[in-house]
Image (cartoon, rainbow, N blue to C red):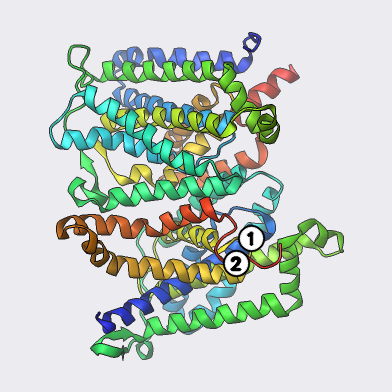
Amino acid sequence: MDWGLFSAQFLNGLQLGVLLFLVAAGLTLVFGIMDFINLAHGSFIMVGAFVCATLAQVTGSFIIALLLAVPATFIVGLITERIVIRNLYVRDHLDHVLATYGLILIFNTATQLIWGPEGMVIPIPRWLDQPVDLVGGMQFPSYRIVIIAVGLILAVGLYGVVNHTRLGMLIRAGASNREMVNAMGVDINKLFTIVFALGAAMAGLAGMLIAPISEASIGMGDQMIITAFVVIVIGGIGSIKAAFFGAMTVGMIDTLGRSYIDGILKLVMTGQNAETAAPALSSMLIYILMAVVLALRPQGLFPPKLS
Amino acid sequence: MTAPRARPTAITWAGLTVLALLAVVPIWTEWADALFYRDLATRLIILAIAAVSLNLILGFGGMVSFGHAAFLGIGAYAVGIPAYYEEYSAYLQFPLAIGLSALFALVTGAISLRTRGVNFIMITMAFAQMVFFAFVSIEEYGGDDGLVIDVRSEFSGLFDIEDHVIFYYVCFAVLVASIYLVHRITRSRFGMVIEGAKLNERRMRAVGYPIYRYKLVCYVISGALCGLAGALLGNYEFFVSPSNIEWTKSGELIFMVVAGGTGHLFGPLFGVVSFLLIEEGLSRITIYWQILFGGLLVAFVLFAPGGIAGMLQRGERNS
């Protein structure tokens, strides 16, 4: 086995995992606490990326742009919740799917109106753009290491907030019994708004981190949001911890699957067939896992201990 | 055990009117030389068949499938892949489209129907994504870029759907037949069990019905019908690609059904008509029409629960 390649792929999987976690964390809280399916959650990825790209051009610094764009996405999330989402909590899931699907169209077109149909590139700051040596002579871009580090730090931070602060206690309480939290005199609407906007800001951050690698483009979050749904379903809905392990599972399976599945298939079939089947199977893997989890263990692989 | 024959309501009259209008569209377009509208109406009819099939499980059965576009794709590829090998016979392509869709519905339905609510939405989406990525990765059949279909299905000895007017009426006949099929199903004992299960599944089971099997049969019928719509869609577009299966397409189908009014026989028809006409109308006003469309969609959910059929019903009650 080529350990250099493996370590590079492992880091790629880790990077995809932490980005997915940033998106899935907000999604799972909104889903778990408010029982709300938000397809438009992916739009915050795009909004974050575009806002950050513009600020990076204006200020000339990616870091300053990042620090300003996160609160900006928070505010976009706040406004979205106040105007539209708030009125939909009492409706059924079908209405959620429809209205937030409409929101995707609004966000995508509004982005096109403001920033034009072309994508925007964020240059990676030079001091972050150094190759790092891995085992076996492989090199890995340092910026990607930074993404992984930022993601892991945020995951730990979020875990701390959810488990060791008053806000986190309310969030957990809301996830397990909404009515009871309300009856205890907590303004649940305010809690919802904050959680929703926090989720939006984290999704936005994922977009900002990924933009220097891919670029900010219209509809960039639409595919990622589906993967984020896979993450929270596989992990178990409503828990940050489950979202984290779910994101890591999906990130690893997706990345390692793409590089190793043809080798595995070649053990059981001819080389030609394996090469045809491998790309199809590797992109289907996470959905197969999702279907298996839903069918056999609908509470997810890492369900919260209580409830 | 059949339901008493109900008096035709405003919804029924509106639905029959739309069908009657659709029946004369080719005559009008030939006369007015507005061939563009004939093509638009053809697409409308094909999507309406798909929406009718989704309404059967979503509206009457309460099964919110977020992966119905998979059947459209399977049906279209069942035309496209044989055509790629220069096999154009409709007597091969259409049974293949219907058969494979039914088989896919049987296998995925058997697994999906063990879940409820949100999980059902998610698992149907997962299966559709599998189909999507399968076709994306098969390079032989164009992968991402899709397949061009140069020749439409050949109904040798019957008619020639290369003729646009004949194709139009073939699609129209399928639409009328599928609406009639759903009408008969919902009036049958089978349909009542399905609707009963939507209202109270536990009670229906307690009464002694094997609900799982009933729902699975319903799901297979719906999938097969949607596969047929897919075969027509492939013929209509002379093209098939994975973009037919994208999750946004499944979302659009859901929207059409809900906008029309779930659980009403003609609901999907209203939904598709308004969807396509609004899309067409708005896209003439501005290239940024999607923002208006999205706004309408949100406003619709917020202010018009029950869809168009619901509005007709309220109008009738108030008068």
What distance separates the C-alpha of mark 1 from that of mark 2?
Answer: 8 Å
Tag 2: amino acid? Gly
Q: Is residue A21 visible?
A: yes
On screen, residue A264 above or below B127? below
Residue B175, percent from left and from top: 41, 20
* Residue bearing the label numbered 1: A30
Provide the secondary structure element on which disc 2 rests: helix
Marks 1,2: beta carbons within 8 A: yes
- The residue shown at (53%, 74%) is A69
Residue B43, image quadrant = top left
Q: Is residue A61 visible?
A: no
- The residue shown at (38%, 24%) is B41
On screen, residue B134 above or below A206? above
The number of callouts visible is 2
Q: Chain of mark 2?
A: A
Q: Left or right: where does residue B31 sit relative to residue B152?
A: right
Tag 1: amino acid? Val
* Residue bearing the label numbered 2: A199
Q: Chain of mark 1?
A: A
**Which quadrant holds the C terminus of chain B?**
top right
- The residue shown at (50%, 29%) is B218
Residue A270 or A276: which is nearer the viewer?
Answer: A270
